[in-house]
Amino acid sequence: MGYRKLGVKSDHRRALLRNQVTSLFKHGRIKTTEPRAKEVKALAEKMITLAKRGDLAARRQVLAFVWEESVVRKLFDNIAPKYDERAGGYTRIVKLGHRRGDGAPLVMLELL
């Protein structure tokens, strides 16, 4: 299949992932369920790789996915330069245990 459905319809899933990627870049870390974190991690790493390129086409590709212009600016100006020497692996998933209500596995997804 290639991706996780996350129990929501395609437009909802796309919006959810865009929101979480935006929040990850805005705050540096997010707390979410493990399957969502794995999907967000893949997308965030692609965005950082684009930002490392730094050209206008890359900026427009990131702007097409990330909701806020200020977050895109932060990604290109502050976050991407930190990873110049690094060839991938920009994020980390730390397991936090299970959610009390439904037992879903919670994780912290953070930028390194």
Image (spheres, grey):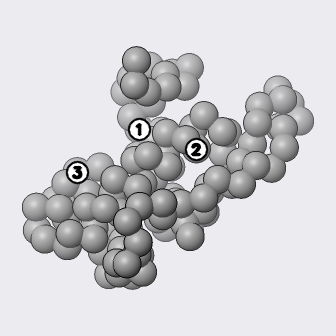
- Element on which disc 2 rests: helix
Q: Quadrant of residue 13?
A: top left
Task: Select label 1 or label 2 by which is in front.
Answer: 2
Q: Is residue 5 visible?
A: yes
Whether residue 22 is visible to the viewer of this picture, yes or no, is no
Mark 2 residue crowding within 10 angstroms, few (<14) / some (14–19) / many (20+):
many
Nearest the eye: 42 or 9: 42
**In the rendered image, which quarter contains the N terminus?**
top left
Q: Nearer the viewer, mark 2 or mark 3?
A: 2
**SS state under label 3:** loop
x 40%, y 55%: residue: 45
Image quarter where the C terminus lies is bottom right
Mark 1 → mark 3, Cα distance in angstroms: 12 Å
CA gap, disc 1 to disc 2?
Answer: 14 Å
Q: Are marks 2 and 3 in contact (CB under 8 Å)?
A: no
- Residue pictured at 53% horizontal, 60% vertical: 91
Disc 1 residue type (three-letter): Ala
- In percent of width and height, residue 76 lies at 30, 74
Indicate left or right for 3 with 60 as reference.
right
Circle 2 residue: 37
Q: Secondary structure at mark 1?
A: helix
Quick check: 37 above or below 78?
above
Residue on which the image places disc 3: 64
Disc 1 marks which residue? 15
**In the drawing, what numbered circle is on residue 31?**
none
Q: What type is the residue that disc 3 sits on?
A: Ala
